[in-house]
Structures are given as C-alpha cells and as structure tokens.
Image: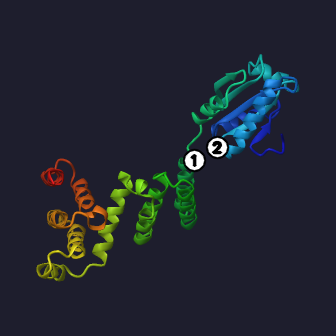
Amino acid sequence: MTNQPLALEATRDNFARLVLENSRMGPVLVDFWAEWAGPSLRQRELLLRLAREYGGRFLLVTVDTDRQKDVAREMGVKSLPSCKLFRNGKPVENIYGMQTESDYRELIERHIVPLADKLQAVALKKWHGGEREKAVQLLAEGAMAEPENPALPLLLAKLLVQDERTEDAYSVLSSLPPGVRGEAGIERLRTRLEFVMAARNAEPEVSLQADLSDAPDRSDTRFALASVHLMADDYGAALEELSELHRRDPAYRDGLPRRALLVVCDLLGPEDERTRRYRQLLFDR
C-alpha cells in the first residue's frame, strides 16, 4: 500500500493527519479491510482502481482492521467490507457491504470538486501571483483535454483580454467546436472581441461613411462603422448600422449581425426602449 501515492495506509498514530486533516482540503475515502474477508479484498481492489482513474481528485486511505483494531472500533466499524467518506474533518458518507462499481462512483462524484473548477482555481492563483504565462498554459491544456467544456476557454479568453491580447483571445474562442462556440457566454465575448478588433483596424469614420455611400452593400465596412460607433458609446448609431447590415446580409460572418445586435441590446439592458425595439426587429424577420 505504501507504494500507492493515492492510497495511503492509516494507523492509530497517523489517522488524524491522513484522514481528518486531508479531508479539509478534499474528499478522503477510508477503506476498512482485512485479509480474511474476501469481499473486502474485492472492494479494496476496486477502490484502488478508482483512485488511479480519478488521479488525485479524492484520497484513498486504507485501514487493516486486524492490525488497527482501535481505529476500527473508534470509527464504529463492526463488519467488512466497510468504507467511510470524510469531508471537513468528519465522516459524511458510510457504505456497509460490497457495492456495485456505480455505487462507489456515485459516492465519489457527490463530493469531488470538478476537475475544471480545480484547474480554474489553480490558474487564477498563478495569474494573480504574477505567473501569467503559466496560468495561460494550464487553461490551454485543460481546454484541449476537455474540448466540450466551455468554462476553461472562456476564462482563458478573459485573462488574455486583461493582458491586452485581444487577437489571441478571439482565436481561442473561434477555434472551439461549433456546439461550444455557440454557448451564450462564449458567443457574447467572441462578438465583443469582433467589435474591438474591427474598431481598432477601421479607417476614420468619415471615410467609412463615404465608402458606404458609394457601395452600401460592403458588409465589412458597415460592421467597422458600427464598431466605431459602439466604441464611442454611440449605441443608437451602432444599432442602426447593425440593423441595416442584418437586413442586407444576415449570414455575414456566421450570423454576426444578429449576434452583434443582441450584444448591444445586452449592454443597454432590458429596460431600454431600444432594446425592446431591436429585439422585436430580430424576431419579426
């Protein structure tokens, strides 16, 4: 057992440290077993496999009840197999008798912190501690490992925006699978980044308006003009240009006109009369 980094052997002397103290940082599953009890040996093998599979998201501690009779008695263990799950210094779950694998999984899942949540916490700690590139690397690796989870790339993009790496943030969000890219939070941020980049690269407002007078169907020019208006906090003018863009070219850049209109409406808030008017416009078309 001592060779198992995720499965530690408890004694009377170290039980408080291994189980009670560690349970304040995460779930600790204590397996009570004995060599003479066949079912407890099967439970032990199953829990060892789950400990390896979960890769440290819970700690497995084993107690040989023949050698640690005092511990077993103090924990109220009267039959084998038996296991207890500890959180915050006390037992919160008990299992008596051999269970199915799914039962043990359900027990563990009720108490573990989702891997994505743990990774976000670590990345944020490093970010605020000045290790920005390490935080970005952790989130990027996590996003690749869990491609269907929107939380990791969304946080990564937000941190990149804070670091004034707008194009990198947009690239992260645009490279996601379509189903994840369409998640509300990601779609909103991606659209806002499109506004920022378009305004940053736009010609002067006078030139954009002149170009549209000559060629009103230039979608890139009209979106650039809407972006310039938005960055200047002229929401009304931005909405007018986006509405016209939606009328002329609704499929432009994967439906950007509609997404952009909704983002501006979100910025204005639900009580603004323009929000109601332009949202209604979208539904009427």
Q: Which residue lies under the disc numbered 1?
A: 115
Q: Which mark is residue 57?
A: 2
- In this rendering, position of residue 140 left or right of residue 34: left
Is residue 198 something one can see in this rendering?
yes
The residue that appears at 37% across and 53% down in the rendered structure is 185
Judging depth in this view, the residue of 275 and 279 nearest the camera is 279
The quadrant in which residue 33 appears is top right
Q: Is residue 64 above or below residue 174?
A: above
- Residue type highlighted by circle 1: Leu
Cβ–Cβ under 8 Å for marks 1 and 2: yes
- In this rendering, position of residue 244 left or right of residue 29: left
The residue that appears at 74% across and 34% down in the rendered structure is 46
- Residue type highlighted by circle 2: Arg
Q: Position of residue 75 (x, y in %)?
A: 74, 22
Dot 1: element: helix
Q: CA distance from mark 1 to mark 2?
A: 8 Å
Judging depth in this view, the residue of 113 and 13 nearest the camera is 113
Q: Position of residue 111 (x, y in %)?
A: 59, 35
How many C-alpha atoms fall within 10 Å of the one at disc 1: few (<14), some, or many (≥20)?
few
The quadrant in which residue 123 appears is bottom right
Q: Is residue 28 above or below residue 218?
A: above
Q: Quadrant of the N terminus?
A: top right
